[in-house]
Image: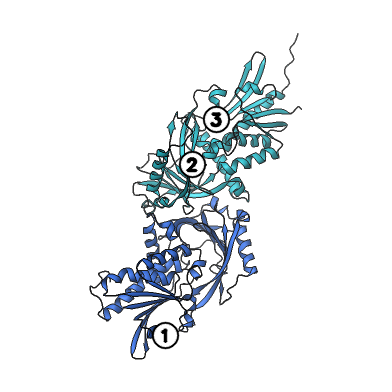
Amino acid sequence: MRVVVIGAGVIGLSTALCIHERYRSVLQSLEVMVYADCFTPLTTTDVAAGLWQPYLSEPSNPQEANWNQQTFNYLLSLIGSPNTANMGLALVSGYNLFREAVPDPYWKDIVLGFRKLTVRELDMFPDYSYGWFNTSLILEGRKYLQWLTERLTERGVKFFLRKVESFEEVAREGADVIINCTGVWAGALQPDPLLQPGRGQIIKVDAPWLKHFIITHDPERGIYKSPYIIPGLQATTLGGIFQLGNWSETNNIPDHNTIWEGCCRLEPTLKDAKIIGEWSGFRPVRPQVRLEREQLCFGSSNTEVIHNYGHGGFGLTIHWGCAQEVAKLFGKILEERNLLRIPPSHL
Amino acid sequence: MDTVRIAVVGAGVMGLSTAVCISKMVPGCSITVISDKFTPETTSDVAAGMLIPPTYPDTPIQKQKQWFKDTFDHLFAIVNSAEAEDAGVIMLSGWQIFRSIPTEEVPYWADVVLGFRKMTKDELKKFPQHVFGHAFTTLKCEGPAYLPWLQKRVKGSQGLILTQRIEDLWELHPSFDIVVNCSGLGSRQLAGDSKIFPVRGQVLKVQAPWVKHFIRDSSGLTYIYPGVSNVTLGGTRQKGDWNLSPDAEISKEILSRCCALEPSLRGAYDLREKVGLRPSRPGVRLEKELLAQGSRRLPVVHHYGHGSGGIAMHWGTALEATRLVNECVQVLRTPAPKSKL
């Protein structure tokens, strides 16, 4: 059984790992290969701050809420193991700020210690009058991708730097199942008018005195268009840019100024922070995550494709739940083809 | 009106903050801070500086609460300003955890810190040996940055800073009109105070920048306090122990206790051992004393003995010490009654 995963961001690598962990021992042979035209530190995942936090409103596909929860619970279960820093994983607490009262988010019981902000806490943020405090998780993209790469390499999964032009080319080379984790560029392999780039720009600074995340919200402007400050394991990410349909890969000065002014207003001590770097990335925005099977016919054989893309600004937040779902679909494929030596008991 | 000459003995957090308070609140005086040790070699430099106050058995709770509140409010204003990084003050959230349910579930300072509440069951899962806990947000004030920041303020209001070891408070007479004694453990000698004794604390300052929360076992013996540029792991409480050299066995043991609470600390690097002697006393000595020798008089305001609560209480007690200094100044400025022949 040859599986080719296209894409080496968090979605591609975690899905590859999930499949290999679950099925290596129940298949006679399982070869998993990762094809990608870019690897860490050049993927979209590497630009993300890595805070586990879904969007505020309930997703149109209720499964996404489950996948978010599964991811949080999985990551939380790893807290307490000695390796968390190597994985890029840490607990982090912080503030969500609003200009007016809002309903509690659907994920309030998933995170730890969720509560409303007290008056004294709100006094710290003069532009905001309402908010939440909770403890969540940071999963830093770069460190996590490095960790996933190590785990996959240990398992004999091979990586290939190549730009895939079509599913057909991969199928004709002998792939039985293709996992499509191409993120914002999925449209190049198969047109998808629902998929758009949600361009973001971030500034990474050295501000080790900041221990809390601060995320502001402006419901009129929309998600990620209001300043946010997210401390990582070493550096702190400043952001607040979301431009739908913008494919510009370069950092621009107006966006830099928007981020810098917004974040310094929120946290005046940032004026002393040293800027480490600035990056742009494209959130793969879609009304819903595309997570489904598709059978493609090339010549006489059928190739199974499992799509797993379109995770918007919540890829790290949702990745493990999606990886497990893909593994489930993969399991069905194996059943249909009578390939399982022992039926996996967890299906 | 003559300038009143004030000597502050000691340049730890007490000496420097009292000097700053006096310069702001007592008009017409000159201030000289005199000490043999300055930052980064004071006890205040070793302390983690967490605003989690101890309880002084000899002091009324209301007074302790006022001292803590004054200190918290003072540092809270700094942390919300652009000065925070210069002053070494940060905000930190975390947990104080208990192995058994405490008789007093809500401490007296619960409404001084921010967002105080009991830990949820899910939060306690992280600490399988513990059954109860507090979650809150408080401040951390770091000596190595805060003391230089205070020193700048002393100099900014024309205060002098002198390096000199004082063996006897009378050395300051007659050059100074009032002495403020902030000499911590030095008061055993300088004030003949046998009630003050060291409680030795050994800590490790390590690199573990992924730790974003404080964790404190309610016994106060084991704690993890992330700071600006390192994480303080502690600790010990060795009464009557004057030894300032770190003990390697103790360091190993501290690391082991802290790793039990936060396993990711196994990846901590660049470990440095430090020792501080807490200037412990049943209560803080905050009072005036008029020293007399023959016809010589020397008004002294004592301001020392904060034990493990130095940083947590410093501004509140400095304000009170300053009020006492003001009283001394008033006395000096009141013309003496002319004796009738």
Q: State the separation of the CA atoms marked 1 and 3.
A: 78 Å
Pointers 1 and 3 within a single chain: no
Would you say B87 lies left or right of A153 here?
right
Chain at numbered mark 1: A
The colour chain B appears in is cyan
Q: Amino acid at mark 2?
A: Ile
In the displayed structure, A333 sits above or below B292; it is below
Does dot 3 land on a helix, a strand or a loop?
A: helix
Would you say B27 lies left or right of A58 here?
right
Q: Which label number is shown at residue B184?
A: 3
Residue B315, located in which quarter of the rendered image? top right
Residue A183 image point, x, y percent: 47, 75
Does dot 2 land on a helix, a strand or a loop?
A: loop
Q: Which residue is mark 1?
A: A169
The colour chain A appears in is blue
Q: Amino acid at mark 3?
A: Gly
Residue drawn at (65%, 68%) of the image = A253
Q: Earlier in the sequence, mark 2 or mark 3?
A: 2
Q: Nearer the viewer, residue B188 or B166?
A: B166
Residue B301 image point, x, y percent: 61, 27
